[in-house]
Image (cartoon, rainbow, N blue to C red):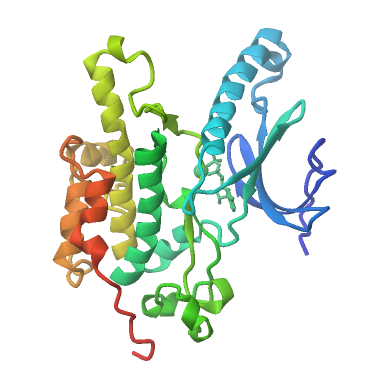
Amino acid sequence: QASEKLPQYPGLSERFQLITKMGDGAFSNVYKARERKTGQKVAIKVVRKYELNSNQENRLDPNFRKKNRVTERANILKEVQIMRNLKHDSIVQLLEFSESRDYYYLVLELLEGGELFHQIVKLTYFSEALARHVILQVAHGIRYLHEESGVVHRDIKPENLLFESIKIIPSKINKARPYDEEKEDEGEYMPGIGGGGIGKVKIADFGLSKVIWEESTMTPCGTVGYTAPEIVKDERYSKSVDMWALGCVLYTLLCGFPPFYDESISVLTEKVAKGYYTFLSPWWDDISSSAKDLITHLLCVDSSKRYSIDEFLAHPWCNVKDPVPDLNS
Ligand code: ADP
Ligand code: MG
């Protein structure tokens, strides 16, 4: 069915049959693939070792090649190193890592729903119950990273939040209810896993992530005794960049557009720097004041006052028990 011609990768194609391309990045391609032996479907992130669009002269220069190889190797190995140590239901699992002369291969748990999150928010917005269902999964993933793994993700955004399985009918989305195994058969609005609704969401792309705390001791990385205060502080607050991003995602889920936007990058930068956003009428009129209060504590310019992940999870909005929306209304 995939008419597009897919490349052959040495050391990979023998074991995996590529099915379709799912993601396209500057340095990486992500494919849906099938392990030939077992039939298991996976996602494979293929990363080129060299920058391809550098000019010929550069590419022939052995020093350039060496330098480029070193930096990229360090980055991808860091991503792999971090992912290897993570195991959580809301984090995309790294299954295997290998390399050939020209490529790195990250074999990942497949999320067939892809980043449809992005499409959804372009089309419409989520009910509070559905937004809560989605954001709590992401938040539990972040809690695991921040509190149990000492990792900050640093690139939380809709493109890096992937659905396990989801099918969207835009006009029905606000009637969709959180996935409920018991009611699988009733999921005519949003056939997800087994037809029951909207399923699991997981955090992907650890390309920018960073370990800030030693796992064993839960102290800052590096020799603690000699670390300057601004470094310790900075590392403490770097978790807060994920919390800001979480606030942006939650805002976007609830109304369908992001909190900060401007055609001009310099104006946009200014708005973000000042934390200038509003709960725009009429879109926010019917959204609970509890949701707004939570967002206010996330989109807080002073990072020392911004909610931590534990404060987020303790907020009343996160602890409302979802009333199942009436499917017939
Ligand atoms: P990049 O560094 O290029 O952003 P990502 O790891 O974010 O790389 O992958 C790029 C895109 O590929 C994602 O936004 C998503 O659409 C898709 N993708 C990545 N990992 C998976 C996966 N495990 N399952 C399904 N799609 C994926
Ligand atoms: Mg990405």
Tell me if I can see residue 52 in this picture: yes
Tell me if I can see residue 279 in this picture: no
Residue 136 lies, in percent from the top left, at: 35, 58
Residue 133 or 224: which is nearer the viewer? 224
User: Which residue is rendered at x = 33% and y = 25% of the image?
Assistant: 219
Residue 265 in the image: above or below residue 284: above
User: Which residue is rendered at x = 29% and y = 9% of the image?
Assistant: 226
In the rendered image, the residue lying farthest to the bottom is 328
239 vs 169, left or right, is left
In the rendered image, the residue lying farthest to the front is 216
Quadrant where the N terminus sits is bottom right
Residue 296 in the image: above or below residue 170: above
Residue 28 lies, in percent from the top left, at: 62, 38
Quadrant where the C terminus sits is bottom left
301 vs 76, left or right, is left
The count of marks equals: 0
User: Which residue is rendered at x = 79% and y = 56% of the image?
Assistant: 38
Residue 219 or 37: which is nearer the viewer? 219
Residue 15 lies, in percent from the top left, at: 82, 45
- Quadrant in the picture for residue 123: bottom left
- Quadrant in the picture for residue 64: top right
User: Which residue is rendered at x = 49% and y = 67% of the image?
Assistant: 199
Residue 258 lies, in percent from the top left, at: 31, 54
- Quadrant in the picture for residue 325: bottom left
